[in-house]
Image: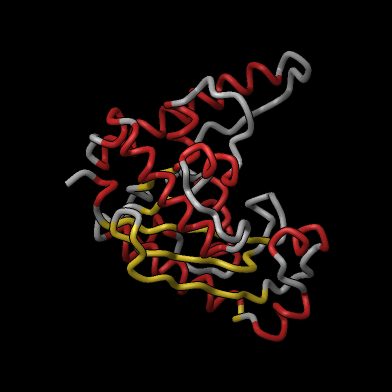
Amino acid sequence: MTWWKGPLTGFDLETTGTDPEEARIVTAAVVDTRGAGVERATTWLVDPGVPIPAEAAAIHGITDAEARAHGRPAAEAVEEIARALAERLAAGRPVVAFNAPFDLSLLEAELRRHALPTLADRLGGPVAPVVDAMVVDRALDKYRKGSRTLQRVCEVYGVELRDAHEAGSDALAAVRVAVALGRRYPQAGDLPLDELHRRQVGWYRDWAVDLQSWLRRKDPAAVVDPRWPLKEAS
């Protein structure tokens, strides 16, 4: 069976900010599917322990008051999220994300912050297999004009995104985009998962090198981190 017809796990975080080393988790979702069909979804509302900036709350809709009143303690929630992902990865079930280096790196930073084992620690090796719908789309439809936001990519592939910036909705949409990519592009959809993972490492690195070269036309010091799926080596 090709990977996009089999068991998949969508993963998404909504957070306090855009820096994966500094931002904190506010909501999270782990959505198990078979192909595009949902089997089970688990979500978390987290008290991040720091103020949620107004600009972040405006995007995901979670206020400080709601997080403090109803959110799980951060250390408990982060442990549960990591355990859920590690169990699936250890079983060979791919974790699907949209811009994996953000979500996975942020989770790893939270684990370190709370002195908990990282995903790599739990797996005893690389964090894999991962399918990053953004990376695959960008590599295989390289010259398509327009933005590469999840909302826009969903439109391109005919995927319904019911509630943008709600973690469960975004996680499921990432899976369904990945399935659409696997169906449309056999050069990704027909690959074994371990090979697809390796290809994404190269695709992301190539994109980062090209972007850094372009940015350095104006800023010679510009740096684009080429590591995938984690900014921390895994």
**Which residue is located at x 54 percent, y 42 percent?**
155
State the image quarter where residue 189 is shown.
top left
Task: Tell me: 165 left or right of 204.
Answer: right
Q: Where is residue 206 in the image (x, y as percent from the top left)?
A: 49, 23
- Whether residue 94 is visible to the viewer of this picture, yes or no, is yes
State the image quarter where residue 46 is shown.
bottom right
> Is 24 rendered above or below residue 198?
below
Task: Work out whether residue 210 or residue 31 is closer to the camera in this orientation and state it.
Answer: 31
| Residue at the extreme top | 217
| Residue at the extreme bottom | 69
- Whether residue 108 is visible to the viewer of this picture, yes or no, is no
> Is 92 rendered above or below residue 166?
above
**Which residue is located at x 31 percent, y 33 percent?**
188
Q: Where is residue 103 in the image (x, y as percent from the top left)?
A: 54, 53
> Is 218 rendered above or below residue 107?
above
Q: Position of residue 58 (x, y in %)?
A: 78, 61
Number of numbered labels in the structure image: 0
Q: Where is residue 84 in the image (x, y as percent from the top left)?
A: 39, 68
| Residue at the extreme right | 54
> Is 230 rendered above or below residue 88?
above
**Which residue is located at x 57 percent, y 70 percent?**
114
**Which residue is located at x 72 percent, y 55 percent?**
17
Task: Tell me: 15 left or right of 204.
Answer: right
Task: Work out whether residue 229 or residue 190 is closer to the camera in this orientation and state it.
Answer: 190
Q: Identify the coloring.
A: secondary structure
Task: Tell me: 86 left or right of 79.
Answer: left
